[in-house]
Amino acid sequence: MNNITILVVDDESRMRKLIKDFLAVKGYKILEAADGEKALEVFETEKDKISLILLDVMMPKLDGWSVLRQIRQTSKVPIIMLTARGEEQDELFGFELGVDEYIAKPFSPKILVARVEAIINRVYGNTKEIKDYGGITIDAEGRTVKVEDKVVELSLREYELLKYLVDNENIALSRDKILNNVWNYDYYGDSRTIDSHIKKIRHKLGKKGKYIKTMRGVGYKFEVK
């Protein structure tokens, strides 16, 4: 995916360089902005090229929330918010404004890259590609799942949940995050519905169901080991 361009917005030059160095290794093209006003200027000029935005919250001239609001008026480009504040209320606020991912500083650059790649693959990936996850094969175009060449019958929601887990392979996902991304914001029920769906998916996957790990006190993670 060497045609992917990412806009990195952060007032700390060292942080921008760190992120740029790790993403450049993956072949991504990087644009930079040191404040909110510059971010909007770059976005307006290059929005046809920009595939994803890494956006800091606390910045001079115009903060990240203001930038986010303005971009969301005209674009649905994926946005990952970066912030030194890890309050749950801040995270929920970001999701309400249309954030696709939320990462609190300090963070592992490798985890950041993994989350960037997960979003890029989910939004821009080749849907015709059939991927194998330790014996579980998923055809995104046909929306079919097979375990060792045998078709597994999943409901639409079960499929979407499994797909979200494998797209974020090796990343621990909270129940709230799963609800926001799989059930979206129109769901107001209990998060225990996720546990029920996970139980059904594990059963249908048979021995491969062990790849869906329970992260105590957090949620779930798909990990092939």
Image (spheres, grey):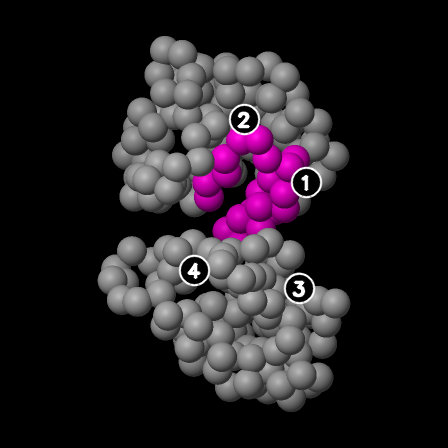
The residue shown at (61%, 64%) is: 222
Above/below status of 85 relative to 78:
above
Mark 1 residue crowding within 10 angstroms, few (<14) / some (14–19) / many (20+): few
Which of pointers 2 and 3 indicates the residue nearer the eye? 3
Question: Mark 2: which amino acid?
Answer: Val
Contact (Cβ within 8 Å) of mark 2 with mark 3: no
Residue to which mark 3 is pinned: 223
Disc 1 or 4, which lies upstream in sequence?
Answer: 1
Q: Which percent across, then down, holds residue 184?
A: 33, 58
Name the residue carrying label 1: 110
Question: Along the polypeptide, which appears first: circle 4 or circle 2?
Answer: 2
Q: Are marks 1 and 3 in contact (CB under 8 Å)?
A: no
Please give the name of the residue rendered at 60% of the width and 54% of the height, measured from the top-left corner: 171
**Closest to the observer: 146 or 108?**
108
Q: In the rendered structure, which amino acid carries the disc numbered 1?
A: Lys
Please state the extent of the stretch shown in magenta in the rendering.
101-125
Q: Earlier in the sequence, mark 1 or mark 2?
A: 2
Which residue is located at x 29 percent, y 43 percent?
A: 96
Tell me the residue that label 2 is attached to: 8
Disc sitting over residue 175 in the figure: 4
Q: How many marks?
A: 4
Magenta includes 124? yes
Distance from Cα at disc 1 to Cα at disc 2: 16 Å
Viewer-side label of 1, 4: 4
